Amino acid sequence: QAAPQGQGAAPVDANSILLGQVGSLTGGQATFGISTRNGIELALKEANAAGGVKGKKLAIRVYDNQSKPEEAAQAATRLITQDKVALILGDVASSNSLAMAEKAQAAGVPMITPSSTNPTVTAKGDYIFRVCFIDPFQGFVMAKFARENLKLNNVAVLQDNKSAYSIGLAEVFTRKFTEMGGKVTAVESYSQGDTDYRAQLTAIRKSQPEGIYVPGYYSEVGIIARQAREVGLKVPLMGGDGWDSEKLFELGASAIEGSYFSNHYSPDNPDPRVQKFIADYKAAYGAVPDALAALGYDSARVAVAALERAKDLSGPAVRDAIAQTKDFPGVAGTVTLDAQRNAVKSAVVLKVEDGKTQYVTTINP
Ligand code: PHE
């Protein structure tokens, strides 16, 4: 099922360069794909208004993966074999990006994930890049925050066993928090899509933690927060970037208030470049951009700059140009790609307050 081509992008013809996006436009992570698509579309609109690339306009074909890795793999194959795109942007959830990266690497088509943080994604090969930090850093950030800022000694972990992202982040957090002298009192797990978490939360309550680390996605975390309160757990919840969605506040309501999560960007950043992006995005989409939108925007701008620099539009030439990305001024931080094709950036910690996020602190690598 082809999603409509991004509005605002030029129609595809001989005078355009076609890019592809695979995103979760429906399903459990729908807001991830939609925000990312909006950010990409805004960047391409600006690039086209500024004359495009190598005298050509940029167009994009977007496919929905329904928040499923199998669909993500198929969509990537379609972009590669049918649409013959110059490069692929996406996805958000690491398990989807892993499935896509397999295909992109095998075909020699460059792929940039805006926001997948699991380290194994870019390890798939030399055609796979990301413009965000990775989870060994993100897990360290929340362990440090829990120990040093919240002064917690005992924390329980609740992970999503169906998500490479969640498993990886739970592992890093547990290791770092323990190294810092803290104790992980219980590790429980669930499967994406579950609706009843009371058994795990009851086991966690019995371990008497002072906080719970839940590195999952907003759709499950919102419900987990409510059920945690139901079983009598009053302690703060902590999480990672997967919490970042308007829907979290809706699903979690008062139960999610006072929780903390690590993220890539804060709309409170006073940098005029960031504030201009927020104003433009608001004007176009009627919402404050989340980190997905910011990283989608950055990924498309990094792609456009690389296409401009590339000696031609072949896979190897575009790959080489992306690999040279250095000091690129993104709205979610400066992007310099290292030898593993990852960006090294700082993270922010946000607090949920009054149904929105409040900037707390920045933690550097
Ligand atoms: N980092 C998450 C993953 O790899 C995806 C994500 C990024 C979700 C940013 C929300 C915000 O699965």
Image (cartoon, rainbow, N blue to C red):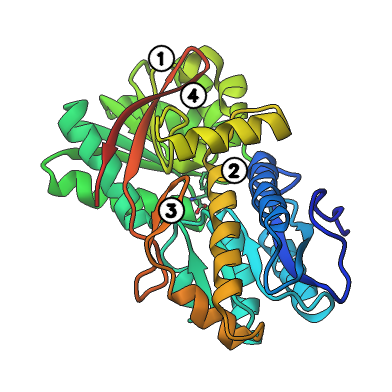
Residue denoted by label 3? 329
To which quarter of the image does residue 79 belong?
bottom right
Q: Which residue position holds label 4? A: 225
Q: Earlier in the sequence, mark 3 or mark 2?
A: 2
Residue 39 vs 315, above or below: the answer is above
Are discs 1 and 3 less than 8 Å apart at CB? no
Apparent side of residue 6 relative to residue 110 in the rendered image (left or right): right
Q: Residue furthest left?
A: 181
Residue 293: which numbered mark, if any? Answer: 2
- Please, what is the three-letter code of the amino acid marked with disc 1? Gly
Q: Nearer the viewer, residue 338 or 179?
A: 338
Q: Nearer the viewer, mark 2 or mark 4?
A: 2
Q: Which tag, 1 or 3, sits closer to the chain's start?
A: 1
CA distance separating discs 4 and 1: 11 Å
Three-letter amino acid code of the residue under disc 4: Ala
Q: Earlier in the sequence, mark 1 or mark 2?
A: 1
Q: Is residue 352 left or right of residue 185?
A: right
Rounded to the nearest angstrom, the CA distance separating label 1 from label 2 is 36 Å
The local secondary structure at tag 4 comes to helix
Residue type pointed to by label 2: Ala
Q: Where residue 66 sits in the image (x, y, percent)?
A: 75, 51
Q: Position of residue 208 (x, y in %)?
A: 26, 25
Closer to the chain start, of discs 4 and 1, is 4
> Residue 232: which disc?
1
